[in-house]
Image (spheres, helix red, strand yellow):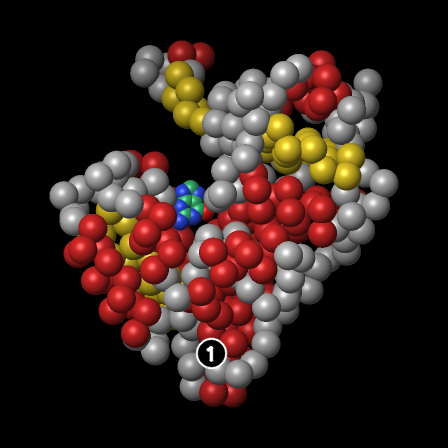
Amino acid sequence: MTKAVVIDGKAIASSVLQQVKTASVDLVTAKDITPGLAVVIVGNDPASHAYVAAKSKMAKECGFASSQFTLTEGTTQSELAELIENLNDDPKVHGILVQLPLPPHLDSEMIIQSILPQKDVDGLNISNAGKLAVGDLRTGILPCTPAGAMVLISEIHGLDLSGLRAVVVGRSNLFGKPMGQLLLAANATVTMAHSRTKDLRSICCEADIVIAAVGRPEMIKGDWLKQGATVIDVGINRVQAPELGDGRTRLVGDVSFNEAKNVVGAVTPVPGGVGPMTIAMLMANTLTAAYRAAGLSFKLVHAK
Ligand code: GUN
């Protein structure tokens, strides 16, 4: 039985954040510019509030000027559009993040596309998504979670994935599509699987790298995975945990961690895998945006 490496997302995120903090101080010293991040949340979803609180807190820890806009569930499209317009016009704001999902009466796509591409630290604007689609990984902004997942993969395989087969399970604009493009840019042979894919198990079984982002608790079992594979679990699912006591819950991923760790070579835990990387990459993107606004450039140094 192999003993899988448990990829420590917290530790890797912390090394990214260290670089961000140092570069943030450098920007203040050199240009008297403090990176500014505006985080917008609409409505009452408790999980979204928890994510946004973590993002705002981390921005402060990185030395950024962080502002949070907490809007009520009943906010109208034009009120939200006006806020984005004001943030677009504010030179102190280098990054704008609108937490998704928005309440169903709001048109998220219209809001995302109204963010200036150079302030779109989520990398979801058509301009940024288009640059990634044509293989320009330099001048746009990459979506945080896929970029973070790539850092974790590079810890195991380095930056060149030539000869490796990767399967992405999930095809969202927020994660699956950009993840597939980043893997392709790193020379992996990529399969995009999704809810309509037939025989997902046999596709996963052939993969050297499995990336799961389906939002279904522990759907991917140990016997779906190849010996020695690398597994990146993007799922964050809250499930009942009666073993912890009455009414208690816990977080699990889209992969059965306990089964996977006896089969694969490396696996990310949930929590403590991809999650911390998303926040770290958001900080790196905000810093990149602030550096570019100052006519400078910032580049993360990869561990490998
Ligand atoms: N909701 C879940 N993940 C994300 C993310 O990476 N960015 C935004 N804006 N909303 C999210």
Viewer can see residue 283: no
Does residue 173 sit above or below 114 in this rendering? above
Residue 13 image point, x, y percent: 58, 52
Q: Residue at x 43, y 61 (%)?
A: 120
Q: Residue furthest toward the right?
A: 163
Q: Quadrant of residue 83?
A: bottom left
Does residue 2 sit above or below 6 in this rendering? above
| Residue carrying label 1 | 293
Q: Please state, as top left, top right, bottom left or bottom right, where the N terminus lies in the image.
A: top right
For residue 132, side relative to residue 55 (left or right)? right
Q: Please state, as top left, top right, bottom left or bottom right, where the C terminus lies in the image.
A: bottom right
Q: Residue at x 64, y 57 (%)?
A: 134
Q: Quadrant of residue 256?
A: top right
Viewer can see residue 285: yes
Q: Nearer the viewer, residue 292 or 189?
A: 189
Q: Residue furthest toward the left?
A: 74
Q: Residue at x 55, y 64 (%)?
A: 140
Residue 26 image point, x, y percent: 54, 80
Q: Secondary structure at mark 1?
A: helix
